[in-house]
Amino acid sequence: MGAFAEFCIVPFLMFLCFLFGDTASPNINTLQVCVDQKGMGSCFSTVQAAVNAVPDYSDQRTIISIHSGTYHEKVMVGKSKANITFKGEGYGSTIITWNDTAKSANGTFQSASVQVFASNFIAHNISFKNEAPIPRPGEEGAQAVAIRVSGDKAQFYGCGFFGAQDTLHDDEGRHYFKECFIQGSIDFIFGNGRSFYEDCQIDSIADSTQKFINGAVTAQGRSLDTDNTGFAFVNCNIGGKGRIWLGRAWGPYSRVIFAFTTMSDVIVPEGWNDFNVPSRDQTVFYGEYQCTGPGANMSTRPSYVRRLNDKEASPFLNTSYIDGDQCALRDRRFPPIQAKELPYLECTVSLLTDYEAANHYLDCALRDRRFPPIQAKELPYLECTVSLLTDYEAANHYLDWEVGKHGIIIEFNDPDYNTRRIPA
């Protein structure tokens, strides 16, 4: 997996990629505000002041550009502040931090440095941190949350999450984390969200001087078998120090999947824990699929841990797990064309601001790892709807594209496909 480079974001009229369909339709009249610690120019001096200035219940996206610096403040993005983007200057450069604990804030959930209750929140190249001291295992009231994500359809790109116990409260809703750095020691990704973590670095800071197990990556809180929640980790890397579990069953129906993930020896051989409630062995869903590294040896995993086959793993391997199978970049001035029977693609979109004068670029790579990548470039704005089929062996995956005036060229490296030109 590559280094965690910052996403390159030019000034844009629409955001990177809309994972969640119609709720994220672009509006050209995007609002722009900025935050600078010194209040330079027309910028706000605090992040909270910028959030407060966003119109309530607006359908427009507001991009809050947060300049480099460490912002010591608690921030709340309330339910009325939908469609906000935090755009930092690098997760090592733009940091929002506070130091509350469960004891000081009257509860774990309230200890978060940043709380997000609004829908359609996006963050790029910024860190969320709780700088409370690292607790001893079993220490009362020491939980210290960096961010609480309680709004639906949140997206994080190239972000950092820093803390120890309970760093990232993935509370509820559908969430996407791409190329993020997540650090902690005990249950440091916890909650009852339905979330997809892709290409993320997971870093344990558990006490390496202790011989006993003293941490866990996840504590997923699914409480009913009808809850459509859980955490899926794909192509991630787990490292750091200490001896930790992949997860422990905070909820009786806790659901966590790791796929194509590299696990160092910080992951103990048993891998998972039922929260010392044996009845949960029958109800949790803990699965691993094609993981590698010394911590991925499943020979001594508990009997309730699933070694997933292709069919069992497929619902968790891409953003369809969080209903993220639609990507809409619509420029209605161009008449659409359609192209079908393309293998399933993963797209990264770079938008140029002058779309009258220049093309917009789309780099695509197959998510199905049994096929080599393909690329399609020089596309104007497009709209694509992806339909995923679960049986990879039996059928292709379909992608309907509405493309603008230039058409597209698809180059298939797989021998089963020929190079095709799809004209405008």
Image (tube, rainbow, N blue to C red):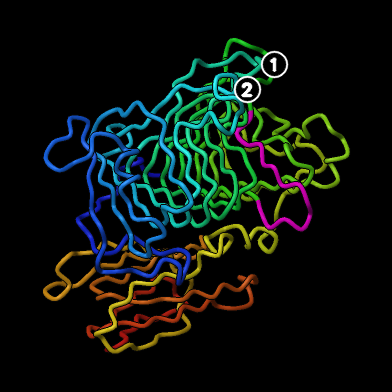
> Residue 282: percent from the left, percent from the top?
86, 45
Question: Do residues under tags 2 and 1 come within 8 Å of each other at their CB atoms?
Answer: yes
Q: Closest to the observer: 189 or 3?
A: 189
Image: 421 above or below 69: below
Let me know if residue 56 is in the magenta part.
Answer: no
Point 22% across, 31% down: residue: 37
Residue type at numbered disc 1: Phe
SS for dot 2? loop
Q: Which mark is residue 329?
A: none
Image: 2 above or below 397: above
Q: Name the residue tied to disc 2.
A: 243
Q: Name the residue tied to disc 1.
A: 212
> Residue 413: percent from the left, percent from the top?
39, 70
Point 23% across, 49% down: residue: 33
Point 64% across, 35% down: residue: 246
First to last magenta residue range: 216-229
SS for dot 1? loop
